[in-house]
Image (cartoon, grey):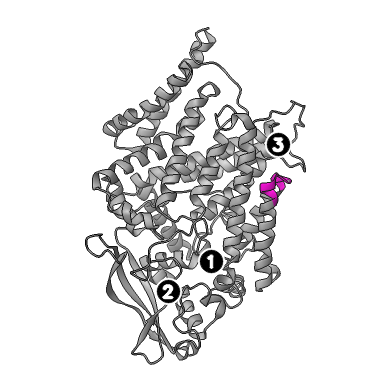
Amino acid sequence: MTKPRLLQLAVFATTLPLWAALERLFTDPLTRCIALWAVFALLWGGIEFAARRGFELLPAGKNTFTAARRFFTIALGAIFLVAFWSWGSQVRGLVGEHGLLPVGEQLIAVQKAETFRAIEHPTLCWLGHGDTLLLAQCWLGALFAIALAAGFCPGVCALVCWALYLSLMTVGGPFSNFQWDALLLETAPLAAAWLPWSLRPQWGRETSAQKIGRWLLWWLFFRLMIQSGIVKLTWNDTTWLNYSALDYHFETQPLPLWTSWFAHHWPAWLHRAMCWVMYWIEIATPVLLFAPPRWRTLRHSAALAQIALQLTIIATGNYTYFNWLTIALCVPFLDDTTPFLRRLARVAESKPAPRWPLIPACAMAAVSIALTFDGMLDAFGGAARQQREMDAMRAEYERTGKAPQTAWWKFLRTFNGYGLFRTMTTARPEIILEGSDDGRVWREYEFPYKAGSLYRSPSLVAPHQPRLDWQMWFAALHPPSNAYWLEALLHRVLEGEPTVLALLEKNPFPNDPPRFVRLLYYDYHFTCAEENPVTWWRRELKGVLIPAVSLENFRKQ
């Protein structure tokens, strides 16, 4: 290993004690980050200054990203393929003609609103409300995703995938309000700016306009990680502040993996150490991704640390394609000098490129940074800033009698803020669906992946997302705000609607639907090995969420 590389690895290693020292010195996360960024700015600036004076500690170099562009294209196409397939496999039961929240009813409702603006609902479903159009969008998107992965006009395919996925997410209702959907929709147009648009792409030729696209992808990943780490400190959640969050996370996450059971029983000191390392990776190391070209090993190390964090999350939970997309966003940081990419790099001849693409690229960069910087302010402002904004909205409503309108660009879901798990759930309530023919003997419906049967081990489902299972987890945390679609679920089960029943794992009434259904409220916990070696869960009944109802109850409404 060369001396320059050893020096950069040593600098990377010093970020651990440096971050620990900054935690001791500064309680404010923003001050801590500014101090860290200042240290590295001075270090990089000093090395550059010394090199200009003839004292070159690190050799200069020019970064190329031939292999990274190709790998990123394949990864993004594969993720879009999974996303479209996953949505297509359940779209009829969720928002189809006879689903829980039919598209037709949604669009009719928004048209009746006084503040209706068509631009706020960008979807092809205005052309028709049937299942055929929904499925056509899914399978057309899957075809373009395959073309994207194959390298066929990748820039164009990325934009088409973005448009089709946005169309589907617009009518997804509560089943599409996930941060990874927003992340995928933000990634696609930035990827289109970086990737070639020709039928036979020259992967080794990166124009100035395409470099701007790569820099925007860097900015996206930086925001994603910084915001995800900072919100855990600024939302005043005790478990994140005292490093005990992982004592609860593995048990209370939406869809645990079987490995989560073992991780939950790891000692508390290990959970706290893992939590500290997570903060270091999410907050301290992202700035290293912007290291100058001569510090490329430092940038590679930071990217690999991010990938290691995502692989750890994949190994202990089911977070759909989210972690795989995050790993894909690490790829643009790996230039052709990266050891495992070096042999695949092919640099094309440098040819004069037209200048006009710089105009839309610069405009896109300006818009993206301007519209996403507010997310950084929200992350560092934390709960206090959110409260001030809510107070301002409340005052505006009291003054005018109208709710403030949401900015039109937010409906594109392409300029987002991030911050998953800003507060840790410390309990695991679960909603259990039961049916009965006589109102006395009740039988339980089983969902494919959410906690239900005490004897079924948590299973692998990612990168597929069973959206009803996911939403049942959120509904258990906040039943009143999810009552409208929970009632729709009961209604469809009483009707025996096949598209909705297809979303369930076990139907205890295979011949005829039950006369009555109800929702029970349980508290779930992982078992201990010495407590019961047979079951994975133990549960305690907390009450009845929705008492027994029949079809007659819905006919009276």
Which one is nearer the viewer's eye here, 526 or 194?
Answer: 526
User: Does the rendering let one see residue 468?
Assistant: yes
Place residue 457 in its image quadrant.
Answer: bottom left
Direction from residue 390 to residue 465 in the image, left or right: right
Measuring from the top left, give residue 168's x and y in whole percent. Answer: 61, 62
Which one is nearer the viewer's eye here, 402 or 253?
Answer: 253
Residue at 28% across, 69% down = 539
Say which element carries label 3.
Answer: helix
Query: Which residue matches tag 3?
Result: 359
Q: Residues within 10 Å of mark 3 (few under 14, many from 20)?
A: few
Magenta range: 147-156
Q: Residues within 10 Å of mark 1 (few under 14, many from 20)?
A: some
The answer to whether residue 4 is above or below residue 552 is above
The answer to whether residue 107 is above or below residue 47 is below
Which one is nearer the viewer's eye here, 517 or 366?
Answer: 517
Q: Amino acid at mark 2?
A: Glu
Q: Is residue 149 magenta?
A: yes
Query: Which residue matches tag 1?
Result: 173
Measuring from the top left, give residue 449's x and y in whole percent. Answer: 44, 65
